Amino acid sequence: MSDVSDGVASRVDCHTKVLNEAVIERATEAGLDAMVYAPHFRRLPEIREIAARYSTEELLVIPAREVFTGTWTDRKHVLALGLEDPVPDFISLEAAMAEFDRQDATVLVPHPEFATVSLTAADLYRYEGTIDAIEIFNPKHLPHHNRRARELATELEYPPYTSSYAHLPRSIGSAYTVFERAIETERDLLDALDDGVSRRVVYKNGLRRWRTTANELLHLGYENTWEKADRLFLSGTEPTHPDHIAYDGRFDDAAVY
């Protein structure tokens, strides 16, 4: 763990999308103690298995789900940690939040008010009893997006966090949250987030930061064109769709399409 003047601290990348040997190497070089792995459209049991496989003595990988709620024209992404039971994508925000409450999950808000894929200020007000922290810096954001996120955190008195939100291995280490507590297990991180433990947001600036932003935005364009077309028209039912047999019809009434 990393030492600071007033005690023990841990560097945590609170949201990544990619995980392989190159990611582990870059994360270790960046001095990270833990990272949260929440890939798109993979079910929780698979995420858990992959996270356990890549965790090392130096780097803890924590499984999570970024649940895609709402319709394609009004999507709202929510990051849930500490889930016991799988929660599908493509359900209403209300149903997802109710399920997170039922499971006493730790709920984070990635990229608030970004494009058409995020919780709004009204949502942050509505679910203040469920949400544990909001992201105030995302390398994929332009400066005005990050300013708005900081304003929301301050106005609504939410604890902040940041992440690399890495969809590409080279983005690992570009942003992380330093918790003034030892994070050695998944439970340690959940407790730190639930308890509002003191923390610092750290991110790279300068040329590397803008290179990361450009590369991640290019990848976002790919995700929302060719990759989305493949998912919608070529790949069949997503494994995280509420119609999937794995959910046993529990979310049929909450499905939005």
Image (tube, rainbow, N blue to C red):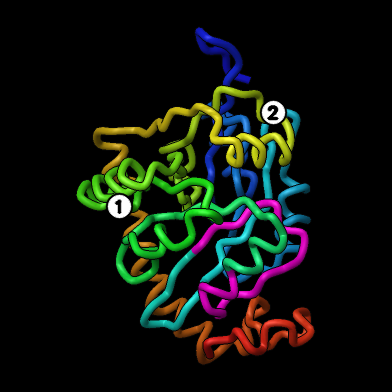
Circle on res. 141: 1
| Segment colored magenta | 78-96
148 vs 10: above or below? below
- The answer to the question of whether label 2 and label 1 lie on touching residues, with beta carbons closer than 8 A, is no
Q: Judge by depth and name the residue closer to the eye, 97 or 203.
A: 97
The outermost residue toward the top is 5
Residue 93 is one of the magenta-drawn residues: yes
Per the image, the residue denoted by label 2 is 58
208 up-or-down from 220: above or below:
above
Q: How crowded is mark 1: few (under 14 residues within 10 Å), some or many (20 or more)?
A: some
What SS does tag 1 mark? loop
Residue found at x 56% / y 79%: 91
At x 74%, y 87%, the residue is: 249
Residue at left 61%, top 16%?
A: 8
Q: Where is residue 201 in the image (x, y as percent from the top left)?
A: 41, 32
Residue in front for this viewpoint, 231 or 93: 93
Q: Does the magenta stretch include residue 8?
A: no
User: Is residue 45 placed above or below 16 in the rendered structure?
Assistant: below
The N terminus - image quarter: top right
In the visual, does 221 lie left or right of 24?
left
At label 2, the amino acid type is: Glu
